[in-house]
Image (cartoon, rainbow, N blue to C red):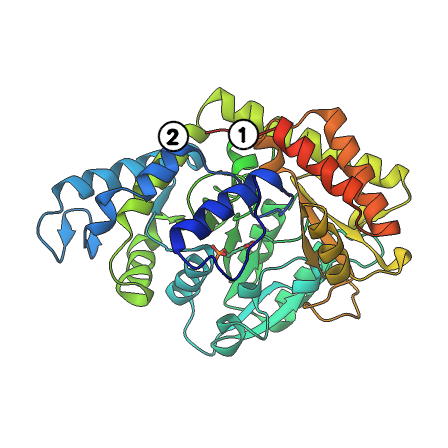
Amino acid sequence: MQYEKNDHICSISDLIALEESRQNLQLSFIASENYAPQAVRSALGSLLGNKYAEGYPKKRYYAGCNIVDSIEECTIKSCKKLFDPHDLMHANVQPHSGSGANMAAYMAFAEPGSRILGMHMFSGGHLTHGNKASFSSSVYQALTYKVDYATGFMDYAEIERLAQSYRPKIIMAGASAYSRKINFERLAEIALQTNAIFIADIAHVAGLIVAGLYPNPVGYADCVTGTTQKTLRGPRGGFILCKKEFAQKIDRAVMPGIQGGPFMNVIAAKGICFDSAATQEFKEYQKQVLHNAQIMTQRFKELGYTIVSGGTDTHLFIIDLRPQKIDGKAAEEKLEHIGIITSRSTIPDDYEKPFTGSGIRLGTAAITTRKISPEALLNIVDGIDACLKNGPTEYLKNLIEKIASQFPIPD
Ligand SMILES: Cc1ncc(COP(=O)(O)O)c(C=O)c1O
């Protein structure tokens, strides 16, 4: 099996076959990726993709929606069962992506030009949390809060101070590259004091939440946004939960606010993903995801690496590579040569731009789906260390390919 691309391959089906080999022979440590099971991929490829169903169940703008109505209703029910067993919230499973879910949530609660407060990207916040390159900053007046540089942890007193002086309409919490538990209760108190709407973005940690391994913002937040493709191990897509009083605002913001017809194939795949996340097997998987993150961070620390905030409570962690005198982009590229797929990352007090970054972010959701053993994981960390110190070698590439073939992507 090989996955090297060459100029003679230009048919999409051949390229898909190559990508399949690449995914099998390389190891993904990208914190936002996972290997979705066959049942999810079948739903994505099903003829549900043919169906137009603008609107919501029983309120569609097209005929022929009886069956897709039931699919969407089942998916909503499964989503609520997972995150909201006490039936406090309304769920919308139509957002095409996590960014779209955030866009709709902002639109539901804030007029263009309103103030929002979110986490700075260098501290781990997502682009949509107020970064200047995103709509969240061009449509709204965004102010960002940072983690405490000394500890790498969120500084709630500082968030409170900023909320009191800036008086944002929305306080956004949740992150792409923050590895610690978030105190949603404290943030809800700050939002209440300052008369702000509190949105929690659980895109990354949704799988950990349903397994009871990470705080659930339901019950504290006015609105919760998330994605299904990361720790939840489902299709690429978003979802929103909101307090029932905001149901209409959210539904209208998603459609017709920012979207047209829902992707019914993706909604079906989300339903399959939610149902599988409700199983004991999924809980055991999430425990292993956390355990593997602990194995890796421990080993990196023994090898002298600096982990931002000193460790992790989640599936992801960020290595500050400044002591190694290598930037994130260079590290990412070296590792790719040996089949270790990571993503460069900024670190809280970074002087590099996001395109370069001073760190790399690693996550264990995908590798745990491959049922990697602890021994193999330690060998991988040692391989990463050797590659970063001495550069990629044929020996290391072969080692990673061997490990990848011992732990194939399950169906
Ligand atoms: C915290 C957070 N929110 C939202 C998103 C956006 O998700 P998507 O890529 O589906 O738009 C991401 C993506 O990584 C994320 O990390």
Q: Secondary structure at mark 2?
A: helix
**Residue that appears at 79% across and 32% down:** 379
Marked residue nearer the N-terminal end (1 or 2): 1
Report x, y in % for residue 216. Answer: 54, 39
User: Type of residue at label 1?
Assistant: Ala
User: Position of 392 compared to 258: left or right?
Assistant: right
Which one is in front, 113 or 358?
Answer: 358
**Residue that appears at 52% across and 49% down:** 203
**Residue that appears at 74% across and 35% down:** 399
Report x, y in % for residue 349. Answer: 79, 64
Tag 1 residue? 211
| Quarter occupied by residue 118 | bottom right
* Outermost residue, front side: 8
Tag 2 residue? 275
For the question of whether residue 347 can be seen, the reply is no
Report x, y in % for residue 318. Answer: 74, 50
Q: Is residue 118 above or below residue 53?
A: below
